[in-house]
Image (cartoon, rainbow, N blue to C red):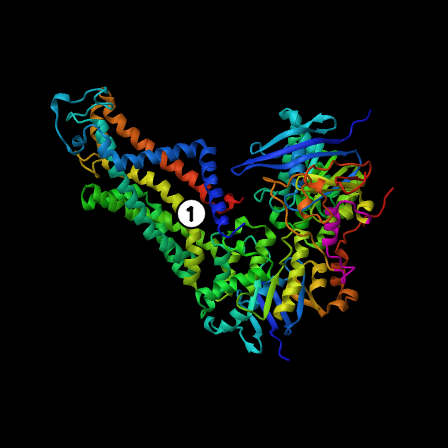
Amino acid sequence: MSGIALPRAAALRRIRFVIWTFTGSASALLGLALVASFLILAAFGGWLVPYPDDATGAIHLAQRLQPPSAAHWFGTDEMGDDILSRVVLGTRTSLWVGLVITLVASLIGVPLGIVAGLLGGWPRAVIMRVTDVFLAVPALVLALAIVAALGPGVMHAVIALSVVWWPGYVRLIEAKALTLRSEPYVEVTRTMGAGPVWILWRHILPNCLSPLIVKASMDMGLAILAVASLGFIGLGAKPPAPEWGAMVSVARSYMPDWWWYSFFPGLFIFLTVLGFSLFGDGLRDLLDPRSARG
Amino acid sequence: MSVALLHIRDFRLAFHGYDGVAQVLNGITLTVEAGEAVGIVGETGCGKSVLARSILRLNPMPPARVVSGTIRFDGADVFAMEARALRALRGAGVGMVFQDPATYLNPVFTIASQLADVLKAHGLRGRTAIRARSLELLDAVRLPNPAELLARYPHQLSGGQRQRVLIAQALAANPRLLLADEPTTALDVTVQGQILALIRDLVARLGLTLVLISHDLGVIGATCRRIVVMYAGAIVEDAPAEALFAAPRHPYTRGLLASVPDLDHPDRLPVGIPGSIPSLRDPPTGCRFHPRCALAMPVCAVTAPPLRGEIHRTACHGVAA
Amino acid sequence: MTPILELQDVVCSFGAHRAVDGVTLALQQGEALGLVGESGSGKTTVLRLLLRLARASSGTIRLDGTDITHAPAPALRDLRRRVQVVFQNPHAALDPRCSVAAAMAEPLQLMGGLSRTAIRARVADLLDDVGLGPDFLHRYPHELSGGQKQRVCIARALAPAPDVLLLDEPTSALDVSVQAQMIDLLIRLRARHRLSYLFVSHNLAVVRLLCERVAVMRAGRLLEQGPASDVFAAPTHDYTRTLLAAVLPPRFTQEIRT
């Protein structure tokens, strides 16, 4: 065996492990499929949908509120816009709001969690008590108050949700850092004379990465749901922007006769949240280095 | 014709994983008669714990799968049992003691309630009857002040006391076979001796059959009359304890004995066995020990040697039957 | 001659519990000292005190005559290079996300002053020293057996060319056939690198093979110490006798019953 062949063999085993994790579990596979479809629609939706202009608020009053048909698979709304086109183009909004919220939340939460977990003492006490206060207030209610102060709009909804989303990350990383701190491999590094910064970069952060990715993946779905919720109560995106929550909100008054109007945006919210949550579960099994033991 | 208490015939068990199939038990044939004290010894990954769990059908299936063979307890096929018969087997047929006494007791319940659970599961009713039997069991495992001990929680007990409680639980339904998987590995040496003495004593007093699993030849030598040596999922040697220590036949057994440091012979350096344990996903052909064996012959790489002999059984091409 | 490591009347308390209770112990240059005792005896705490992973409540700890009991971290440079540790459980002592090469390079990078090529050469040398080939460099801990992991841990400890190895039950998590290889390796490395060992263990048979001197601990106190041959042949303390009697030899030791 040569020195080059081995990493390749290891990579092959790794790939087999990924395939095994996802194919061995129907739910993980479903999550992967849903997330992949979501990303494909977000990336290429503009070229795939039949009426891309309908997403920006074109008006075809002659075709308003038509039931699903060959021309309009998901039917049309009260402006005569194709719901399929609007729902598919809405994935892009959902993708970026999900990404921004989880990214900002982890950028705030991870450093605080690291400081709390590694330093201990009074910095930990302060950080964790503030986190507890945030956790004690339901995130959506707090976000609601912030959006109410800033004024409605999808940007403001994202800002508000980012501000309330981080405490979960502090909790996660603090707990992880606390256990990592007393791992023998960290203690050995300390006996070699490594300072806190070295230990942080070499051992703590890399080992925090997988729980972080798992949580972020699950939070993507939840953040999308939260933005849709704000949209639904009129504090998020405003029509004619193709945002699922806002669409369901308008469609509510057309229930139940024009059911397809609220059904399809609602279905997309449901599938997206479900997809990210199942995908996160699959990732959890995948990223645990112990489960990859050969 | 009398039926052996435990009869395992050509038992093969495989684990299915992403890397393919691991043949964890590869044709185990073993008979334990009532009243015997058998020790099963082997290193990590030899399959000794999987074998013990198989006797009680405790391996989760999947990923485990029985490829062939049978395990019979008192004549009944363990893998054909219905739920009720299986529950009777676990506890009333076989009492099992595990390695780490700290993790097999629930920290939030008292000793009394954990013993009561086991007794109720086996049909004992009535508070006074349960209490009386609990006291009797704790007394049987030589725990002082059993009445006081019943009110305690697991964390208030020492490691040795916890293991005694677990042995009491294993004995609760009057099993015929005591199955102990590394019962002293998590304990201090001085406590280890006491627990082994207790097991020896219980076996003699209650007329139990003992199957004790350990990686430690000293532990086996102090408790068992007959020793089964396992390597990579197969039995390589099965002999009366004295014969095995005095004249081991299989090269692996010899290597194992030569590896153990002996306090009485500080001048004798342990030798060890070159190489390491093979992967069970891709085991060596023929005799699974042949790549590490100094005496390997061409035939060893081709055919797996059968276990031959009457009282002293050996699976080696180099050993005359 | 000044002992390389020395504890004088050291006490280490956690709350009301005295894990180490007035221990005086010296490790001479080049010797192998076995520190034996059961769980809770304080033997591991002694090792942690010497590594400054635990702080002494009172008493003095010296490295080659220099008091390091309360020395601030920068003043511990000498200790961090000259004294290295190998922990009991090799599975936990290697970062699952670091390859063997990265794990072994770490102490050298921390010492500083070595080029990338020099580090790479030294790592390959050390790996060879513990009997592992260069094909192990790019493997990750979960791809190694227990014995291989422990060899990597020993190689990593040897990287800064230390004078002392503190060995915390380095063989007890391993299978006997592998343990025997490890004992052999430790004996050879000690001679080749002129090391002193402080060998913490509950396994008296292994201590007897590796150490010239033994110290027996119980409940934080040092009960007796002396040349291994004397302590094992004629223990002065009752507890040492109990400990020795508890060792099970690999033989048929059961009284034959009828």
Q: Taking the image as drawn, is residue B134 in sight?
A: no
Residue drawn where x is 67% and y is 68% of the image: C33
Q: Quadrant of residue B318?
A: top right
User: What range is drawn magenta here?
Assistant: B246-268
Q: Taking the image as drawn, is residue A259 in sight?
A: yes
Q: Nearer the viewer, residue B211 or B238?
A: B238
Residue C25 horizontal side relative to residue B306, left or right: left
* Residue found at the far bottom of this picture: C1
Decide: few, some or many residues near mark 1? Use Cα within 10 Å; few <14, some 14-19, many ≥20.
Answer: some
Q: Nearer the viewer, residue A157 or B247?
A: B247
* Residue B20 percent coordinates (x, y): 54, 36
Looking at the rendered structure, the secondary structure element under dot 1 is helix
Q: Tag 1, which chain? A: A
Q: Quadrant of residue B97?
A: top right
Q: From the image, tell me which residue sits under label 1.
A: A210
Residue drawn where x is 41% and y is 54% of the image: A205
Residue A188 horizontal side relative to residue A237, left or right: right
Q: Quadrant of the C terminus of chain C?
A: top right
Is B247 covered by the magenta stretch? yes
Q: Is residue A127 above or below residue C81?
A: above
* Residue A216 percent coordinates (x, y): 36, 44
What amino acid is labelled 1 in the image?
Ser
* Residue B177 percent coordinates (x, y): 74, 35
Residue drawn where x is 62% and y is 50% of the image: B156
Q: Quadrant of residue A36?
A: top left
